[in-house]
Image (spheres, grey):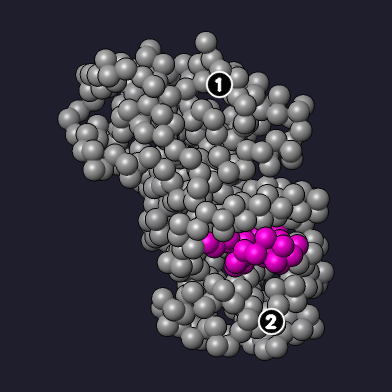
């Protein structure tokens, strides 16, 4: 615990280099910056919350924290689900929410330059005005920011075909662990000089530096998609349909699974009538143009039927199709209305999807825990949602045990502990198991090189980081 004198010195040093209004002082507001949306991930009380607007202001904040030994916890919109933005005691939370400029959209080079506080959907809308498209689309895209997406290497619904955030980051500007403002990466279509430091920063969860600007690759706008919907009597049957789509050689533009618990929660909230029609809903899309799109949609429909769909159809109404995908995006907030939700984010090989879904059901039964399932099923990224009643500590312990069993099962099936939410606090032990001692040592060496004083997001990603003296 730091002294009041130290906190006063920190506040004074920060204020001397910042315009008025950058530092949050309202005690009713500060707690809202202390954690993200990860249930049960621990968090401390920040010594200060700062909302810079420029890269120079960010550099000033970092240099003050270096001088006084204050930890820095970067924060975007706070929509994370792993505890990666959770405050540590007496840290400085640096919120990029006011850094919202879309500085450039270049249709010829197909790139955009943005500040980290730009909301994902806002960038997509701005690109659409130029006939361009930014593909990464996490379910939180109406609220999450590009900076946060970069920090966790976020994915989304269309990433089964188009890849995750790292595939679209060309360059970055960030403040280093020595207080320097640097640029890495490129604006050119090709570039292989030196180590890929921009790629290294993507997915680093704020542990290596503070990002102040991002240059992203864009794609041409797509043709309208064909949508296929299938109803299944179990998640395992739906998983078999996912395998059948892969075996048919299709690369859908989306392939999403929503189980009966999610459908019921969305119905209770939005009255869409989905849970009366299906125990499990599998939604597929293809954006291939012309006859190829027709062929792929028909092939996907046949895969659903052959895998045991109780009902499968190609949607001819674009509004109905969009409503189905909107239900998928609403699943998590709908479940949150029922009680605390502990969110998993494992990813397994596509061939292992049916087996992994079965293992999730076994974990639910073994630990007497309600587990709902939503999934980017087409790329094996599954999101089991463990739901408990508020204040039920026994249920919480059971859910945590199921959480650990699911991670272990994913690793046994050749998977990974996170596909897009990041390691943060909740997956540190799982990441240690997945990586092993030698790879953990490499990660720590990178951390030490880029953040020699260990001030950036300490305690996240890797457990048992050595203390700095």
Q: Position of residue 257 (x, y in %)?
A: 63, 70
Residue 50 relative to residue 190: left or right: left
Image mark for residue 232: 2
Ranked by sequence position, the earlier of labels 2 and 1 is 2
Residue in the foreground of this view, choosing between 108 and 149: 149
Q: Compared with residue 228, is residue 411 higher up or lower down, i.e. above or below?
A: above
Name the residue rendered at 59%, 77% in the picture: 260
Q: Residue at x 41, y 43 (%)?
A: 35
Q: Position of residue 22 (x, y in %)?
A: 24, 33
- In the image, residue 153 lies in the stretch drawn in magenta: no
Left or right: 454 in relation to 120: right
Residue 125 visible, this angle: yes
Left or right position of 400 against 336: right
**Magenta range:** 359-388
Name the residue: 74% across, 65% down.
362
Magenta segment includes 371? yes
Q: Residue 298: give x, y in percent of width and height.
A: 71, 83
From the image, tell me which residue sits under label 1. Answer: 450
- Rendering coords of residue 29 (x, y %): 26, 43
Q: Secondary structure at mark 2?
A: strand
């Amino acid at each position: 615990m730091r002294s009041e004198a130290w906190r006063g010195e920190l506040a004074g040093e920060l204020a001397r280099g910042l315009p008025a209004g950058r530092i949050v002082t309202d005690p009713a507001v500060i707690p809202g910056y202390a954690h993200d949306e990860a249930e049960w991930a621990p968090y401390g009380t920040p010594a200060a919350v700062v909302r810079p607007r420029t890269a120079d202001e960010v550099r000033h904040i970092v240099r003050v924290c270096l001088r006084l030994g204050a930890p820095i916890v970067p924060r975007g919109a706070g929509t994370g689900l792993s505890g990666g933005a959770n405050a540590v005691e007496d840290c400085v939370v640096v919120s990029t929410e006011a850094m919202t400029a879309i500085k450039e959209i270049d249709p010829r080079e197909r790139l955009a330059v943005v500040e980290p506080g730009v909301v994902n959907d806002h960038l997509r809308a701005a690109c659409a005005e130029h006939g361009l498209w930014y593909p990464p689309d996490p379910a939180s895209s109406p609220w999450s920011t590009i900076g946060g997406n970069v920090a966790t290497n976020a994915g989304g619904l269309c990433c089964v075909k188009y890849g995750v955030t790292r595939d679209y980051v060309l360059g970055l500007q960030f403040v280093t662990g020595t207080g320097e403002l640097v640029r890495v990466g490129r604006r050119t279509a090709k570039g292989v000089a030196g180590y890929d430091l921009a790629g290294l920063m993507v997915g680093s969860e704020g542990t290596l530096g503070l990002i102040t600007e991002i240059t992203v690759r864009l794609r041409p706008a797509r043709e309208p998609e064909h949508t296929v919907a299938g109803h299944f009597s179990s998640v395992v049957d739906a998983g078999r349909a996912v395998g059948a789509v892969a075996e048919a050689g299709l690369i859908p533009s989306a392939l999403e699974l929503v189980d009966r618990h999610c459908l019921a929660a969305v119905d209770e909230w939005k009255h869409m009538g989905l849970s009366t029609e299906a125990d499990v809903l599998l939604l597929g899309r293809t954006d291939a143009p012309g006859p190829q799109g027709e062929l792929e949609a028909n092939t996907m429909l046949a895969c659903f039927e052959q895998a045991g769909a109780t009902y499968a159809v190609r949607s001819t109404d674009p509004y109905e199709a969009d409503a189905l995908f909107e239900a998928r995006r609403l699943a998590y907030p709908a479940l949150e209305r029922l009680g605390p939700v502990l969110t998993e984010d494992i990813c397994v090989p596509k061939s292992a999807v049916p087996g992994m879904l079965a293992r999730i059901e076994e974990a639910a039964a073994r630990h007497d825990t309600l587990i709902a399932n939503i999934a980017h099923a087409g790329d094996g990224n599954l999101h089991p949602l463990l739901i408990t009643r508020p204040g039920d500590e026994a249920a919480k312990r059971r859910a945590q045990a199921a959480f650990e069993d699911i991670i272990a099962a994913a690793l046994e099936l050749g998977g990974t502990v996170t596909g897009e939410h990041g390691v943060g606090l909740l997956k540190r032990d799982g990441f240690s198991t997945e990586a092993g001692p030698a790879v953990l040592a490499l990660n720590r060496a990178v951390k030490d090189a880029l953040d020699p004083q260990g001030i950036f997001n300490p305690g996240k990603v890797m457990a048992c980081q050595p203390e700095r003296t």
